[in-house]
Structures are given as structure tokens and as C-alpha cells.
Amino acid sequence: MQVTIKTAEEIKKMRTAGRLAGDVLTMIEPHIQAGISTDELDKLCHDYIVNVQKAIPAPLNYHGFPKSICTSVNHQVCHGIPSDKKLKKGDIINVDITVIKNGYHGDTSRMFHVGQTSAQAQRLCNVAYDCMKIGIEMVKPGIRLGDIGHAIQRHAESSYCSVVREYCGHGIGQNFHEDPQVLHYGRPGTGLELRQGMTFTIEPMINLGKRQVKQLGDNWTVITKDRSLSAQWEHTLLVTESGFEIFTLREGDQL
Ligand code: MF3
Ligand code: CO
Ligand code: CO
């Protein structure tokens, strides 16, 4: 697949899709409480996306994924399937939202804390956030993907955390996942050189323990092999003439 350069028209549509994805996270935030099941979170998001936003939840039936959002709790790394299991005090959860509006995708995820969480959980979520932020802030024409991956890896590892290698950020547009692959580790001076008009996600998955992961028998849910906590944040962005624009920032939020 080729890395596409988006036209001004397409960029407008992606801005809309990105804002909608961010709005779903804003909508769901007050519902993240002990006692709610991830199925209930899925239903709230599904109904909001379909009925209020008049958009499409991209995960539903994507390569057979059975739900409209991904919910990954504690040692779950990504692609957690919503279920009747309830959140409990002290859990951390990643909610990953992807919507399609006017044929274009917006993809964003973030961590939420259920009540008071451990100092280690808070530290991990902050390291994962900073990894994403460090990566995003490097984005501009001329920089290479290996520069970004390296900076993310260096921050994670110097914070005594590890970077998951099996999953990465991705080009996005009319397709949910397109080229390029955006690795969250790497070597400076290597990889694709960014150009104005490229759109992709940065979404580092950071573990408190070792980097190795495994997939559960449901063929989706990814967990840490050592059962250590994992955290992830994700934004969809555009390479602009002088830097970047984040499509999925929530209203009033800054990076
Ligand atoms: N939203 C995820 C990502 O950031 C992909 C989820 S694929 C699904 O790329 F099928 F599990 F929804
Ligand atoms: Co993504
Ligand atoms: Co996502």
C-alpha cells in the first residue's frame, strides 16, 4: 500500500471525524465508574456514535471484531472486547474509539482511572501519555519515523517501562489502517521521511513490566505475558507545513 497525501477536501473530512472520535471520549468519561460493565460502555458509545453523531463505529465487524469500541483493562494491552465484566475501584482502562464520518476515520484512545488507583498505575499512565506527546511534538516535514520511534522508546525505557513491538500506529483516512506503519521504537535517521499532508496515528502501548504480549483465545484481546499493567494513549494527526495538527483533540484540551 502507498502512503497517501490528503487533499484539502480530505483534511476537512478527517478534522470532522477526529473531532467526533474525541467527543465520544468526552461523553463516556463520567460513566467510567466502579460497577459499570464494559458492555454498558460499549452500548453508550455505540448509541451516541450512531444516533447522535450519525457516524459509524469502525471497530464493529472490522475483521470480525464483535463490538463498537475496544476496552482494555489493567494487564490488557489493546483490542479488549467489551463484556459483562464490571469495572472495580483501582482499575485502569483504555477506551479506544474509531468513528467513520463521510467516509473518513478518526481514531483516538486514552486511559481512565476507576476511583483511586495505585501510584504505579498512575506512573505508568503518565509515562505512556508522555511517550505519545513526545512523539507527536516531533512531527513535521523532513523528520523520519525512526526518529520518532526512537524518542518514544528512549522515554519509556529510561522510565523503567517497555514498549510493545507487535502493534503500532498507522496511516489513516478512507481506510482504518493504511501505510505507513508507525513503530513506537526504532533508530534515528531511519524510516519514512514525513511530508505535508500525511495523516497517521501515534499510539504507544507501554508496559510496566516486560514488553512481551500474547493474544487470548478470543482472537482479539492482547495481554502482557507477565501480567504487568499496560497503558496506551492515541491521537490521529496531520503533518502540516511547519509541524502537526491533532484531529482528535477534545474541545478545550491541549496536548
Ligand atoms: N482502534 C485500534 C487502533 O488504534 C484498532 C482496533 S481494531 C478492532 O488501531 F478491530 F479491534 F477494533
Ligand atoms: Co489506531
Ligand atoms: Co485506536
Image: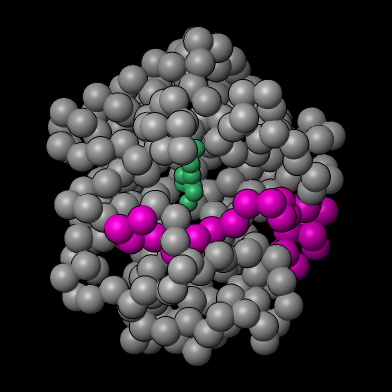
Q: Bounds of the magenta span?
A: 153-175
**In the foreground, 67 or 120:** 67
Instruction: Work out whether 50 lies above or below 138.
Output: above
Residue 127 as seen in the image, left or right of residue 108: right
**In the foreground, 11 or 23:** 11
| Residue 113 seen in the figure | no
- Total residue callouts: 0
| Residue 243 seen in the figure | yes
Q: Image quarter for residue 199?
A: bottom left
Q: Residue at x 27, y 46 (%)?
A: 100
Instruction: Work out whether 95 lies above or below 42.
Output: below
Q: Position of residue 210 (x, y in %)?
A: 84, 45
Q: Is residue 158 magenta?
A: yes
Q: Quadrant of the C terminus?
A: bottom left
Q: Residue at x 41, y 26 (%)?
A: 67
Q: Position of residue 166 (x, y in %)?
A: 69, 51
Q: Position of residue 90 (x, y in %)?
A: 64, 22
Q: Image quarter for residue 113?
A: top right
Q: Is residue 79 magenta?
A: no
